[in-house]
Image (cartoon, rainbow, N blue to C red):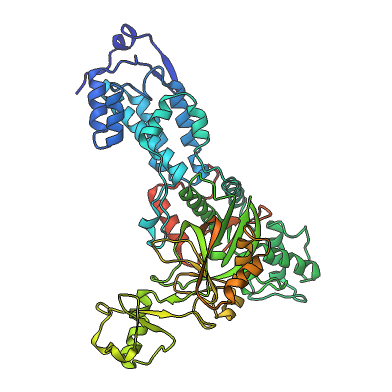
Amino acid sequence: MSAPVQDGHWGRFAVLNIVLCAGVAWAGQSSAAPAAFAQALAADVSGHESLAAFYKTTGYEDLWTGPDDGARRLSLFSAIDQADIHGLPVARYDAAALRAAFAAVQTEGDRGRLEAAMSLAYLQYAKDLSSGALEPHDIDASMKREPQRPDDTYLLAVAKGAGFDQFLHDLPPDHPEYARLIKEKLILQQTIAAGGYGPAISADRLDVGASGTAVVALRERLQAFGYLGPSASREYDQNLAIAVQRFQSDYGLPIDGVAGESTIFALNEEPMDRLKSVIVALERIRWMGDADFGSRHIWVNQPSFTAQIVDDGKVTFNTRVVIGKNDEDTRSPEFSETMKFLVVNPSWSVPRSITTKEYLPLLRSNPNAVGHLQVIDGNGQVVPRGAVNFAAYTASNFPFALRQAPSDGNALGKVKFMFPNPYNIYLHDTPSKSLFANEVRAYSHGCIRVGSPFDLAYALLAKQSDDPQALFKSYLDTGAESRVDLNVPVPVHLVYFTAWPNSKGVVTYLRDVYGRDGKIFNALVEAGLAPLGVQG
């Protein structure tokens, strides 16, 4: 163990430097790397390849713990002190322990270990804030998003160079929705501190003409959310119905002015639940990074059961969609890809899982079952059903595929929208139109069924044709399967936000259809998320 630092070491061999480090005053050290410092630092970063290489390259020069590092230290501590604002797991960085370690430094070995701890905290913080604190696929296999983490060597080089303050300031995703959600988080924390939204609405349904305490609670909730001015009336009058309609419009609910089950559920959501949704939404945006979503992009938010075209930040097209059933194998995944073409009059290649789990048992009992499907061999050729002994096969050894030819009853309808991906997910038409009338629309095997597929096709083709409807119809009328390339490919984002700002900037809240938000929030708590309900 190194000998304790003597006063003479700090006084005779270096100019005494009293440095204010984020509220901690301590004696500075020359920028040379004493052997004990270098040995302790090297030992503590030995398991971290990029850190070990960085310090070896710099000759174990200090980055955080020397007399000339005060401004850098202060910048990092100031940033970490704001980590809770972003809903990050602040215990990971443990600024209090780092400050205590600065106050307790006695040996060069202590300083070397503190240097390593500071670098590790910095790298963790920078990655968490820029690209998310969690790995999506570790939480839920259907979350396919892969955050792009900044390179350690780059982060360390930035810390060593000029402009470190600005770099830390620019770390969060540069999306207006992120900033709006941060503001919403602070408002919710203030609301919680003030006691919440008031009594819950104790009714299953309220309509014009109703009166009583449940109507008063309804009024108070709408007032708290900014949809109604001050009023103490116990009557459900027309003004109250109009306020309910405005709320329903923002929240994607049926706009009927009646406070039914889904409307009351949304109004009764407590600020703590909303705060959790916002914190999870912030993490999800960080997973998507600082890259532009695309000046034109398609935004499919699964909890809202909608698909939108967004042009330069404005929604220019909106349609209802059906997403995957809430089962382990059928939930729609989350990822981003690029739509490159449309297929008009598509055939449907039945996914292997559906073929073996749903259709093969039927065919084993009756070779003529599911007669609308063709049997396809390994060469892509149609095989007569009479030539196949379905009873001889199991799910593991069935050598054929099933396909549905283009038709009015085709499972994919008349058009599918392709953004090639490893998960075989796409947007498509469907002959089952009645499901779009339902409020909760989770019925598919994972792909996204589009409520207004022709209109979506017209909107996409409008960028390359003066008459997109005629162009689309020219392919449709042939009845043959045709590929139509998009001259300008369009980014597609399959996302899952239960808290998201609408076009007016109002943050609206949706049900956690697949239970993913709960998993993410629990993982953030495990990682060190600070207690909720108070301002950071």
In the figure, 458 relative to 208: above or below?
A: above
Q: Nearer the viewer, residue 339 or 227?
A: 339
Q: Where is residue 432? Give x, y as percent.
A: 55, 80
Q: Residue at x 23, y 21 (%)?
A: 36
Q: Residue at x 51, y 45 (%)?
A: 291
Q: Is residue 199 visible?
A: no
Q: Is residue 510 visible?
A: yes
Q: Residue at x 24, y 78 (%)?
A: 397
> Can you name the residue that lies furthest to the left here?
1
Count of picture labels? 0
Is residue 41 toward the left or the right of residue 213 in the image? left
> Can you name the residue that lies furthest to the top here?
12
Q: Nearer the viewer, residue 369 or 515?
A: 369
> Can you name the residue that lies furthest to the right here?
238
In the figure, 341 relative to 134: above or below?
A: below
Q: Where is residue 33? Give x, y as percent.
A: 28, 18
In the figure, 164 relative to 82: above or below?
A: above
Q: Nearer the viewer, residue 406 or 219?
A: 406
Q: Where is residue 50? Give x, y as percent.
A: 30, 35
Is residue 389 toward the left or the right of residue 522 in the image? left
**Which quadrant is home to the N terminus?**
top left
Q: Where is residue 97? Give x, y as percent.
A: 37, 34
Is residue 300 toward the left or the right of residue 328 in the image? right
Q: Residue at x 65, y 68 (%)?
A: 469
Using the rendered view, name the quadrant where residue 421 is placed.
Answer: bottom left
